[in-house]
Image (tube, grey):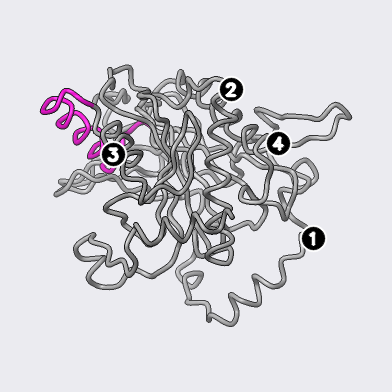
């Protein structure tokens, strides 16, 4: 993948003050973000006891929430806002106050010995829904569709920015899943590089396409529809299922049944159909696992101008049901203690 950067080599960190750094692993080629805008002191990493975490969770009463009144709390100006007929806002999108990536046109290279890095150029935005206590699993499908509408709207705007080659749309629910603010919110980060994980998916999908003349994700959808044992829910346009090789217990994928590489091209009718299946899936996890922390993210084709006809966009939902230990960290292989077939059956029962 080509990345447009300033040709002038920059070895002086002070010239990049205020920017995060994208550092590349010399062996694997993986990227790591050193987020200076979110920098902490070493003592800030002191382990917090579990009872202290529970106390923090129980003390969340919505008072002084930064996202309940973004204007009052000094957030940056909205880049998108939805309002009801009475003028009250229902959803708003604004730049992250402490971005992992900083707005600039072109990243600058940084070379240190044998290592390569670049300034962390990009866009980091927050998508906030109005109600402090009603997260996506508890919303109506029309409200969830509005969130997807905001995702698509911002994607279409950001994809044309200079140096943006991939846009990550994700949501953290619960402190254990990385949500530093309890108020329901999602994040959008537009970056100049494509992550190794996405690259693996792209290459795997392309390899399967070349070998079988068929989309690998379409093959999954067709088999899951035929089998039925891992389906969580579905309608005429979307299907939710626990993947055959689930990485975590109760992992769920939500996927369009019709082949399409690009999430941002979704129409209004399909947003409602997507919201229906997605909300049912989240609500099943909420009920069945007692509101666990979870992450979800949208995997869509990159916006780097290349053709990805072999890819198929989808959403991955990963509840936090276990902690990675030595084996998982060393090998990247998750040890799951429940079969995806049983997990799907359990989640289906939550909809009755």
Mark 3 → mark 4, Cα distance in angstroms: 37 Å
Q: Residues within 10 Å of mark 4 (few under 14, many from 20)?
A: many
**Which residue does the numbered mark 1 point to in the structure image?**
63
**Which residue does the numbered mark 4 point to in the structure image?**
91
Does 347 sit above or below residue 300? below
Element type where label 2 sits in the image: helix
**Which residue does the numbered mark 2 point to in the structure image?**
269
Mark 2 → mark 4, Cα distance in angstroms: 19 Å
Element type where label 3 sits in the image: helix
Front-most of 234 and 293?
234
Marks 4 and 1 in Cβ contact (< 8 Å): no
Front-most of 345 and 170?
345
- x, y (%) of residue 292? 54, 64
* Closer to viewer: mark 3 or mark 4: 3
Question: Which residue does the image show at 73% across and 29% down from the upper left?
Answer: 82
**Which residue does the numbered mark 3 point to in the structure image?**
223
Question: Which residue does the image show at 56% across and 56% down from the upper left?
Answer: 173
* Closer to viewer: mark 3 or mark 1: 3
- x, y (%) of residue 39? 49, 56
* Closer to viewer: mark 2 or mark 4: 2
Does 215 sit above or below residue 47? above
Element type where label 4 sits in the image: strand
Sequence order check: which comes first, mark 3 or mark 1?
1
Sequence order check: which comes first, mark 4 or mark 1?
1
- x, y (%) of residue 200? 22, 40
Question: Which residue does the image show at 45% across and 69% down from the upper left?
Answer: 42
Q: Residues within 10 Å of mark 1 (few under 14, many from 20)?
A: few
- Is residue 204 magenta-colored? yes
Task: Describe residue 39's horizontal placement relative to residue 109 as left or right.
Answer: right
Sequence order check: which comes first, mark 2 or mark 1?
1
Front-most of 288 and 147?
288
Q: Residues within 10 Å of mark 3 (few under 14, many from 20)?
A: few
């Amino acid at each position: 993948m080509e990345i447009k950067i300033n040709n002038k080599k920059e070895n002086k960190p002070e010239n990049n003050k205020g920017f995060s750094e994208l550092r590349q692993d010399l062996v694997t080629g993986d990227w790591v973000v050193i987020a200076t805008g979110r920098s902490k002191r070493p003592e800030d990493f002191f382990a917090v006891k579990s009872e202290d975490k529970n106390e923090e969770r129980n003390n969340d009463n919505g008072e002084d929430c930064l996202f309940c009144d973004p204007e009052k709390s000094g957030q940056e100006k909205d880049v998108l806002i939805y309002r009801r007929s009475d003028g009250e806002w229902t959803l708003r999108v604004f730049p992250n106050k402490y971005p992992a990536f900083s707005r600039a046109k072109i990243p600058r290279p940084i070379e240190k010995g044998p290592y390569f890095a670049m300034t962390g150029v990009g866009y980091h935005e927050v998508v906030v829904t109005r109600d402090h206590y009603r997260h996506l699993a508890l919303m109506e499908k029309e409200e969830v569709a509005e969130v997807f509408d905001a995702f698509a709207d911002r994607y279409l705007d950001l994809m044309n920015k200079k140096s943006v080659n991939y846009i990550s749309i994700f949501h953290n629910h619960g402190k254990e899943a990385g949500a530093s603010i309890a108020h329901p919110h999602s994040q959008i980060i537009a970056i100049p590089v494509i992550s190794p994980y996405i690259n693996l998916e792209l290459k795997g999908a392309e390899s399967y396409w070349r070998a079988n003349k068929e989309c690998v994700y379409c093959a999954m959808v067709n088999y899951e529809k035929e089998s039925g044992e891992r389906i969580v829910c579905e309608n005429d346009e979307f299907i939710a299922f626990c993947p055959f090789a689930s990485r975590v217990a109760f992992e769920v994928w939500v996927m369009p049944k019709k082949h399409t590489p690009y999430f941002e091209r979704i129409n209004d009718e399909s947003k409602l159909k997507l919201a229906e299946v997605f909300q049912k899936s989240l609500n099943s996890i909420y009920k069945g696992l007692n509101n666990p922390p979870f992450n979800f993210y949208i995997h869509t084709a990159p916006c780097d101008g290349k053709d990805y006809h072999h890819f198929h966009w989808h959403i991955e939902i990963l509840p936090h049901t276990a902690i990675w230990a030595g084996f998982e960290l060393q090998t990247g292989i998750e040890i799951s203690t429940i079969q995806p077939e049983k997990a799907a059956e359990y989640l289906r029962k939550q909809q009755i």
